Image: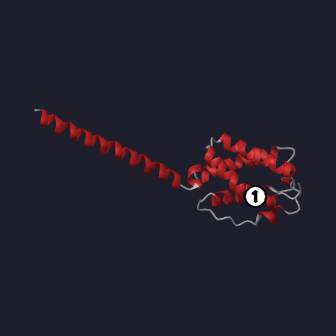
Amino acid sequence: MTGRIGRHGALIAIVATAVVGGAIILSAYVHAQSQSKSLYARLGGYDAIAAVTDDFLGRLAGDPQLSKFFVGHSTDSLHRIRQLVVDQLCAATGGPCFYIGRDMKTSHKGLGITEANWQATVKHLVASLDKFKVGETEKNEVLSALTKLKSDIVEKP
């Protein structure tokens, strides 16, 4: 009888080890899969990027310090600017969009964008990302990507 329990106990131990090992492997696989998703997918795709963009542009246009950059544009031009921002963010985060606008240096040349304007813009972007509960990792990735554009956008210290 002791031999049977011993073998039975050993079998249970082997099965338990296999189950726990399998769970660890599955957990690692799921974690790797979530990390391999593009930033675009982790942000929620096109509609999520469009929603953040709409909120963000609304904040910029409503800020007395930044609203001057939106004055003089027709409704059609404002819609085009919005679409270009959506497409640029979509493409930059690994989405299926193509950005067909001009480079940032050309687009912002002569606007006199200052460091203070840049900081206010970043503050509004963070507020928009927070409103939509974008995770810290994804938020930092978006901000990191945009920071690379700063030297082409800011003209005055």
Q: Position of residue 8 (x, y in %)?
A: 18, 37
Q: Is residue 80 above or below residue 116?
A: below
Task: Tell me the quarter of the image containing the N terminus.
Answer: top left
Farthest residue in the left direction? 1
* 27 with respect to 73 (left or right): left
Q: Inspect the image, locate mark 1, and give the three-letter code of the amino acid beneath it.
A: Ile
Residue shown at the point (70%, 58%) measured from the top left: 83
* 27 with respect to 83 (left or right): left
Look at mark 1 in the image and give the residue it sits on: 81
Is residue 82 visible in the rendered image? The answer is: no
Q: Quadrant of residue 94?
A: bottom right
Residue shown at the point (59%, 54%) measured from the top left: 39
Farthest residue in the top direction? 1
Viewer-nearest residue: 132 or 137: 137
Is residue 130 visible in the rendered image? The answer is: yes
Residue shown at the point (56%, 56%) measured from the top left: 38
Q: Position of residue 85 (x, y in %)?
A: 71, 57
**Tag 1's secondary structure?**
helix
Viewer-nearest residue: 82 or 38: 38
The residue carrying pointer 1 sits among few (fewer than 14), some (14 to 19) or many (20 or more) residues within 10 Å by Cα, namely: some
Q: Is residue 10 above or below residue 78?
A: above
Q: Position of residue 81 (x, y in %)?
A: 75, 58
Viewer-nearest residue: 27 or 57: 27
Residue shown at the point (68%, 60%) measured from the top left: 88
Q: Position of residue 157 (x, y in %)?
A: 88, 54
